[in-house]
Amino acid sequence: MALPLNVASSSSVAADNRSIDALRSSAARDPKSAIKQAAKQFEALFMQELMKSMRAATMSSGMLDNAGTQMGTEMLDTQFAQQMTGLPGGLSEAIAKQLERQMGGTNAVAATPGAVAPAANAAPLRGAEAVTDVGSRQAQFVRLHTESARSAETQSGIPASYMVAQAAHESGWGKREILNADGSTSHNLFGIKAGPGWKGAVAEITTTEYVDGQPRKVVAKFRAYGSYAESFNDYARLMKESPRYSQVLANSSTPRGFSEGLQRAGYATDPAYADKLTRVINTTLRLQRAVI
């Protein structure tokens, strides 16, 4: 039985440190399980403090009360708190859901008409990119593409963080890359379609577009590149040279302005595209501060 946190003993401190180390190790191996464990610990601490407050409000000290009886009471409260923790619909379940939302970011990928469409046909990350933790996947995505985005920033003037975020949104943080016929990645992170003027390689896939606000499955051709850096450079060139997106550059001083500019220019048919992209940009900015 774990001793309560407010029992000042070297054994309790050691136990707490071991619990923290075990939780960190679990987070590296299985983040979803670690979230549930952390949520249960928060709930147990809350229930323990609640019971302590209830005892203080309803019970008075007696002649037989001493340090030993107090410790016994606290240990009993700890046991009761653990038994009441982790029940369906309880506080730990709500905490776990909130933590998962904060770690997960957005998984929605919007469809794009005309010259541009969303990344589809999900492709798992491979090699050094392959990670199981959603939060780690996002951080890895930022690390992997920030240098290419910074290079493209010198061409377009669009902040590198915005481009990394849009690539993340379109590709589902790399989980839904556009694939070639042989299953290899096309390196097309921005879902740019292969129009009549495109002379390079092409990947043909089924994707989703919104028509009159309703999603529709369509078959479309997308540009294929030899590297992710080529994808960023081609996107930067499109943003800079196409009159269609001139106002995007003029309103790129804020995440909201940039996202709304793209939606007004018709980059995506999803009516919620600007809101979704703004959230991903803010997530990317936080990640860059943490990992770059």
Image (cartoon, helix red, strand yellow):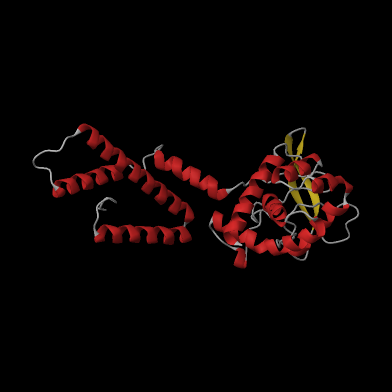
Identify the image quadrant of the C terminus: bottom right
Q: Residue at x 77, y 59 (%)?
A: 153
Left or right: 186 with respect to 3? right
Give the total number of marks visible in the rendering.
0
Nearest the viewer among 250 and 132 is 250
- Residue lying farthest right? 197
Left or right: 8 with respect to 225? left
Could you tell me residue 280's position as x and y percent?
64, 48
For residue 232, above or below residue 38: below
Could you tell me residue 269's position as x and y percent?
76, 40
Left or right: 63 with respect to 90? left
Left or right: 193 with respect to 119? right
For residue 14, above or below residue 67: below
Could you tell me residue 285's position as x and y percent?
63, 53
Could you tell me residue 179's position as x and y percent?
72, 58
- Please indicate, yes or no, whether residue 84 appears anywhere in the rendered image: no
For residue 279, above or below residue 151: above
Q: Residue at x 84, y 57 (%)?
A: 237
Nearest the viewer among 244 and 257 is 257
- Residue lying farthest left? 63
- Please indicate, yes or no, whether residue 212 appears anywhere in the rendered image: yes
Indicate the quadrant where residue 287 lies: bottom right
